[in-house]
Amino acid sequence: MSAAGHPPVLLLGSAITAGPELLGGKAWSLQRMAVLGIPVPPAFVLTTEVCRRMHSAGESLPPEVWDAVPAAVAELETATGRRFGAGPRPLLLSVRSGAATSMPGMMDTVLNLGTNDEVERALADEFGDTAFAADTHRRFRAQFEQVVGRTPVADPWEQLRGAIEAVIDSWRSPRAVGYRESRGLSHDAGTAVTVQAMVFGNLDDRSGTGVLFTRNPLSGDAEPYGEWLPRGQGEDVVSGRADALPLAELAAAMPEVHADLLAAAARLEADARDVQDIEFTVERGALWLLQSRVAKRTPEAAIRHAVLLRQAGLITTGEALDRVTPEQARALLDPRLDRAEPAATAAVATGKPACPGIATGRVVTDSGEAEERADRGEAVILARPTTDPDDVMAMSVAAAVITELGGSTSHAAVVCREMAVPCVVGCGTGSLMVLAGQTVTVDATAGAVYPGELTVVSGAPADDPDIALLTRWARAESPDSATGSLPDLLLRRKMERVR
């Protein structure tokens, strides 16, 4: 039993009342979805206290923690009717990090754990598909080697222990430490580890994976927004290695699944009273949700969503004002690209808008070089085939980020939205590396990259309906601060609350 009165390993279910500080955001979201009656694969969690204890004592996984894992795995076996690491119906597991505060893409995950040669044969026999079984084994080997740092042994229990320890260790990785320092987050909070039964988006034509936002995180429109990848697993979409399809493709292929997904999304948004970022998998036409969290969004979307949620009665006026930062309001009012000039200038690359904004700088294709040049005061446009957590420090100092692969829910898109860095993704294989050393202007609102430095003009007007409405609300809440622009009013409000 932990010092807080909770066992270090908890089976997720309706009896669990702990919050994200102990369960981590990922497990807490699974718990929340299960209570709401939304389908989630069964899971258990090693709490954040395990991470804190390991790092404070400098020890490996405590014996009493590991001793509790087999019983938790047995519960997953009972719930699924499968057996961990053995046929004829193997249970495979995902091992995911989960800090209390979301750190997108910063820590590690291992999927398809429990696979070995025997399990590959059992999967092939069960599903009648040797290609699926081989693909699942290949994915596991590659990810385990990348995260854990060694070739996986055949013993599934040794695989599980190695993955758990590696995921906990990823809390202290340079990229995770740098992320927390840049956002003023505590290094003492630790990460939980969620161990969950796998569902397979790579199984057949009625399987796939995707990401859904309950409202558009780019424009702020009220309509749901997302991407869908048939025959894929979650890492394919997040990494940007594969180009996902619009969510409308899921609606066309499996309308009943799409309807169930939208119904679950609406329930989650109403429960959280905020826009949600939802990861889901479809296995043979059955929908499973894997995570729901507050969505990262562009400055424009933050303003539009705050107004929409207030008008829908989900939040108060004060909460709407709290949801918009002075920096976000200022970004929407900032200058934008002169539309007359690009009309006469051919774009050297086009892709999907992932985070709006305008930036001009020198194209650099190496993250290390980008950091060095930015440190010298140069405006840098970071161009990569696709980004991963090792690129985050360079992304944070770049004037803009552009990628050849990936969609609007890829790693580059999500991280840039969270950092408010202009970003264009999915420009096409081979389209950006040839630009190295050139000066370009990135119009991340339109998803275009232009040669040279182009002219910018004024941003959104102060009488924009949503800006004007927020301004009136801010003045009404603070009559003594009834002058100034929206960014000024929000800054005063923030300072008054601190005092």
Image (tube, grey):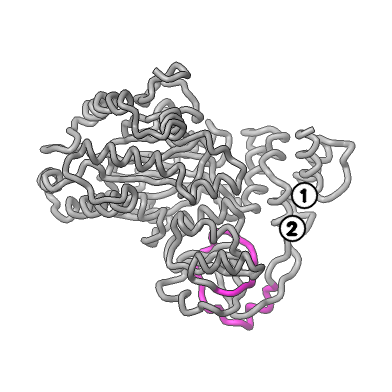
Name the residue located 57 percent from the left edge and 51 percent from the top edge: 418
The C terminus - image quarter: top right
Instruction: Say what amino acid the circle numbered 1 marks.
Output: Pro
Name the residue located 41 percent from the left edge and 53 percent from the top edge: 238
Please tell me whether residue 309 belongs to the stretch shown in magenta: no
Q: Cβ–Cβ below 8 Å for labels 1 and 2?
A: yes
* Residue 109 shown left or right of residue 93 in the figure: right
According to the picture, the residue beneath numbered tag 2 turns out to be 333
According to the picture, the residue beneath numbered tag 1 turns out to be 487
Highlighted range, magenta: 338-363
Between 476 and 293, which is closer to the camera in this rendering? 293
Precedes in sequence: disc 1 or disc 2: 2
Does dot 1 land on a helix, a strand or a loop? helix
Instruction: Say what amino acid the circle numbered 2 marks.
Output: Leu
Please tell me whether residue 340 belongs to the stretch shown in magenta: yes
* Real-space CA distance between mark 1 and mark 2, rounded to the nearest whole angstrom: 9 Å
Q: Residues within 10 Å of mark 2 (few under 14, many from 20)?
A: many
* Residue 355 shown left or right of residue 140 in the figure: right
